Amino acid sequence: MAATLPSKQKHPLRKVLDFLSGYHLASALILLLGVLTWLGTLEQVDLGLYEVKRKYFSASNPFLVPKYNGYTIPIILPNAYWVGMLFFVNLLLGTIFKARWRWASSGTLIAHAGMLLMLLGAFVTQHWSTRGNMAINEGETSDVAQHYFDHVIEVTEMEGSAPSKVHVIETKHLKDLDPEDTRLFRMENLPFDLKVEGYQSNARPVTPGQPRNGDRGTLVDGYHLEFREDEVESERNMGGCKVTVLNKQGEKIDEFLVWLMAFHPATVRVEDKFYTVKVNKSSWKMPFEVHLTDFTHEYHPGTMRPKRFESEVERIERGQKEHVLIKMNEPMRHDGLTFFQASWGPQNARPGQDLFSVFEVVKNPADKWPEISMWIVGIGLLIQFGMKLVMFIYNQAKRDV
């Protein structure tokens, strides 16, 4: 009687590799991405676009609980960012180890490469893109945009009544602060330091005796900064904090509350020189200037639904001017930047009144990657189905002979 040979056991690492590159995992991830996209689209009605993007596609939140129409859906789902990362790994390993590397499968391999490029583009956009807005009045020129969300503290040296030099405490040093935190900033090029307390990304000043709506922040001269929940659209958050000015020996010179929407910055005098301190949106300097020549808008008859918004601009770079027309869905792309027609104002403008145009400015290294990836996928599928068609016609012809 023949001896029974022991079955060959797979190495544990091979089992893990088979699972990560498997078709079952790919199908589950695609289905999950579809569900997350659907739920995020529904929740956008309540949260707004940017909050939904942060909740569903941010790397900082591995899991989420969806909501619809104000009601919590009692399930815990993985964040779409991490689902996409796992799908990238699955697709890459599946292409290397599971796909058939032969000429007959070349179209499939090309399509897989396009899908990998699309997922990689989403990763690059998430981590290395920058977004802001630039508002320009008709007839005026600007080369500065403001970030949507990033707040900074600006300390400005004054020469008489004119600002001369600005020192900035950047967003990365503020956004990790909780309201109860205190942080000392050593200002190397100034004769004083700043102590920041009670920083909040969204706050309101409260006068003495004013009704309380939220948690009261730090008290200065009877005034508080009232902490509030983030707005539905995060770009409307108005950051604020208490700032204490200290000399280099650590002794207090002055203290005050600063807030994004304050009419005037706080002013302090140190060594017979005046300085202003304020919270502001982070500025972003462009490598060229944009001059708004004319803005025109049109609504669909009898509605407030936009039909046509467009801005005639001149792009000024190294003394050279180039005329460009920026329309809805037809942005201006130049030097790695994309200018989209976002909005305009004032909304109640009278006939003949000068208008201003607001552009969304995006710097995204992967701006064109989705378009390129779609072309690659399309070419791959065309090759694959074309080869199948040719083989079908060839086999039919042989059968008829």
Image (cartoon, helix red, strand yellow):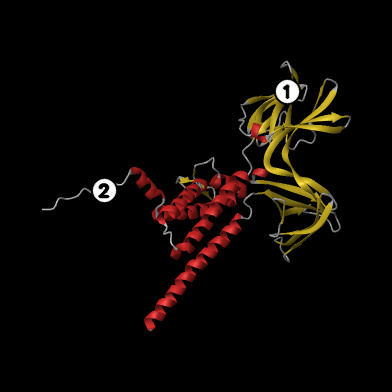
For the point 46% across and 55% down, the residue is 30
For the point 72% across and 47% down, the residue is 133
- CA gap, disc 2 and disc 1: 70 Å
From the top left corner, tell me how far across and down residue 166 is, in percent.
78, 33
* Quadrant placement of the C terminus: bottom left
> In front here: 130 or 379?
379
From the top left corner, tell me how far across and down residue 42 is, in percent.
55, 53
Q: Is residue 105 above or below residue 141?
A: below
Identify which amino acid the numbered label 1 is placed on: Asp
Work out whether residue 13 can be spotted. yes
> In front here: 365 or 300?
365
Residue at the far left in the pictured view = 1
Work out whether residue 237 can be spotted. no
Image position of 35 (left or right of 367): left
Closer to the chain start, of discs 2 and 1, is 2
Would you identify the image quadrant in which residue 244 lies?
A: top right
From the top left corner, tell me how far across and down residue 34 is, in percent.
49, 55
Which residue position holds label 2?
Answer: 8
From the top left corner, tell me how far across and down residue 314 is, in percent.
81, 55
Local crowd size for mark 2, using a 10 Å CA cut-off: few (<14), some (14–19), many (≥20): few
> In front here: 6 or 335?
6
**Numbered tag placed on residue 100 in the rendering:** none
**Numbered tag placed on residue 193 in the rendering:** 1
Task: Describe the element under mark 2 as helix, strand or loop.
Answer: loop
Identify which amino acid the numbered label 2 is placed on: Lys
